[in-house]
Image (spheres, helix red, strand yellow):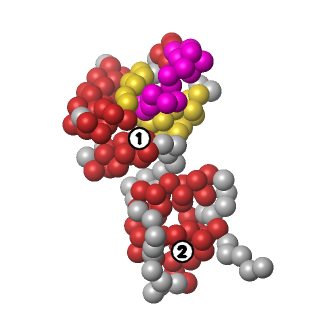
Amino acid sequence: MPLTSPPRTLLDLASLLSESDLEHLVAEASYHRLASEEELRDQAERNPGRRGVLTLRRVLDLPGGPRRTRSPAERHLLRLLRERGIGGFETNAKIIGYEVDFLWREAGLVVEVDGWSGHSGRIAFERDRLKRARLEAAGVGVMPITGRQIRRDPDGVVARILAALRRRHRRSAA
């Protein structure tokens, strides 16, 4: 039975998916070592007239490259940060033993995108509070935001992130 390689499969999907969804798959494939950026660029080079090549190239050329996200709300925030020209962050990064949604490592700021479904039970509530307490104790600022806030008040979300970054940069410069 003939099968296509993961890089070729991603190229084929590039003509069917939105850039956001394709970025998600490309980042997941890279994370799981199924398709490297080099292999994907090679697919695009070897198939110049194929539908989806331009979309795949745009995804590979995104500022900071394709970023791994774990929820639609994280993808929405990522898009918003890019649209506003805000950089310097990592997505789903490790810090003091925790994986955090967005990390401005130099500023020591974490943004956690909390959805009701994943954070509403007793265990999640306790886990989230312990994570935040340990990060704060280590000097890392934590800003929780919700998908609803991102959708309904994107300007407010961006303003809060920028204010926190300015405050933390001033503090570290002093």
Residue 8 position by quadrant: bottom right
The secondary structure making up most of the magenta span is helix
Instruction: State the extent of the magenta-drawn residues as a range.
Output: 110-130
- Residue at x 31% of width, y 32% of height: 149
| Residue found at the far right of this picture | 1
Left-right relation of 3 to 87: right
For marks 1 and 2, give the CA distance: 26 Å
- Residue at x 25% of width, y 36% of height: 152
The answer to whether 139 is drawn above or below residue 78 in the figure is: above
Please state, as top left, top right, bottom left or bottom right, where the N terminus lies in the image: bottom right
Q: Position of residue 107 (x, y in %)?
A: 39, 29
Q: Nearer the viewer, residue 26 or 166?
A: 26
Residue 104 position by quadrant: top left
| Residue found at the far bottom of this picture | 49
Please state, as top left, top right, bottom left or bottom right, where the C terminus lies in the image: top left
Name which residue type carries label 1: Ala
Q: Work out whether mark 1 precedes mark 2 in sequence or the reverse, and give the earlier one.
A: 2
Identify the residue position indicated by label 2 in the image.
12
The answer to whether 138 is drawn above or below residue 153 in the figure is: above
Identify the residue position indicated by label 1 in the image.
73
